[in-house]
Image (tube, grey):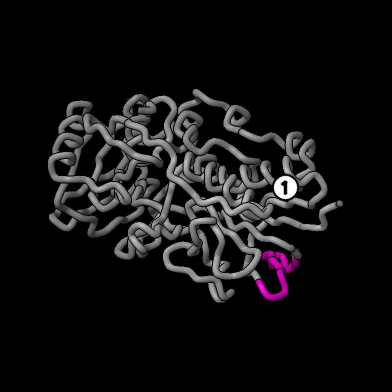
Amino acid sequence: MPSYDHYVILGNGPAGNNAASFLRENDKDAKITIISDENIPFYYKPGLTRYITGDLSASELIVESLPNYREKNIRLRLGQIVDKIDPEQKIVFLRHKEKVHYTKLVIASGSRARVLPSMRGYAQCLKHITTYNEVLEFKDQIQAANDFFIFGGDLVGFKFIKMLGKMGKKVTLLIYPNAFWPFILTHEMQATIVSNLEKRGSEIIVGDDIHTIIEKENAYMVKTVKGMEKKVDMVFSFNGLIPTVEFAKGSGLDIDHGILVNETMQTNLPDIYACGSCAQIYNPVINSYTTSIGWPNAVVQGEVTAMNLLGDHKVIESVGRKYFDLEGVRIKTTWWEDIEESSSI
């Protein structure tokens, strides 16, 4: 019997694409649409630093090419911004006023770089590399620049710092321990990390904060609370991620930091699921909701979401843990994905 479902998936990352692929494998007749605000098909985000250095081409970043979507009969709509959703009428409203009707909705909108409240006044000075579009915008500037100021840290930031070191760039890092959430950085770990970075020529600032950032003559003057001043070519902020869920506010969906879902990835509203880093998943063991970030988790969540959309009752489980080395500190995690640096246990 043919399916009359229209699965609409908001987000073109690992969660959304794995949901779409599983749905197509098990429902040959349904209509499937992926809506993304980016202008590039599904790509491998952990490879962005290698794209900056030239070790990977843009085509090598691509996980699913446009012909693959056509072969699977999955409609991919790029460069489309979602303004809001109406769960009662089952409509997704796009920025250009188009309405997209669905029978079942998957929200896999991911996360974006977090700007600390204290830094919002300097947001125009802060650069990020969490998406392909951001990397494309800053790639040439990064290659041409010599002096970099990094604020925060986080695991993506440390990968970026490592890349800059290999490129022979000068790096000043104002380390912000809370940037590593959900990983807790102890004082001992911080000391080891600082020591290793300093050995490789990076200047590390601890126990301080940014006071002002002034853009002047294609450069930036950064002044800290304790009076240190640094003139640099570019300023980057790495302070973790926040779920991209603004379009869902006011829809009736339960939202905390992300969209709240149960162990089967279902929201509080019928026919709407959420997965990936935009979702907060209920954990019955601790009786609370937790954000589960990272590529490996997103892959599993996308597949579980699709199973349950098709009538299963699959409960999400944690993926296997991996170890990786963060500047001399051995970290065990379920969510960091770097095939060059991590290893399964």
Q: Is residue 163 left or right of residue 177?
A: right
Horizontal arrangement in the rendering, residue 35 relative to residue 224 (left or right): right
Q: Give the image location of residue 110, x and y in percent.
A: 52, 52
Residue, disc 1: 76
Point out residue 59 in the picture as x, y percentages from the top left corner: 63, 29
Residue 280 screen position, x and y as percent: 45, 59
Assign the C terminus to one quadrant of the image.
top left
- The region drawn magenta spans 87-99
Q: Is residue 287 visible?
A: yes
- Per the picture, the main secondary structure of the magenta-coloured stretch is loop
What element does badge 1 sit on? strand
Q: Answer left or right for 99 relative to 64.
A: right
137 with respect to 78 (left or right): left
Which of 345 and 98 lies nearest the eye of the viewer? Answer: 345
Residue 38 in sight from this viewpoint: no
**What is the crowding at mark 1: few (fewer than 14 residues within 10 Å), some, or many (at least 20)?**
some
Does 5 appear in magenta?
no
Residue 95, percent from left and from top: 67, 65
Question: Is residue 93 on the magenta stretch?
Answer: yes
Q: Is 68 or 233 nearer to us in this picture?
A: 68
Q: Nearer the viewer, residue 23 or 80?
A: 23
Res. 99 image quadrant: bottom right
* Vertical position of residue 19 compared to residue 141: above or below: below
Q: Quadrant of residue 154?
A: top left
Query: Residue at 79% across / 36% down in the picture?
Result: 71
The residue at the point 16 percent across, 34 percent down is 192
The residue type indicated by label 1 comes to Leu
In percent of the image, x 65 and y 64: which residue is there? 271
- Farthest residue, direction right: 1
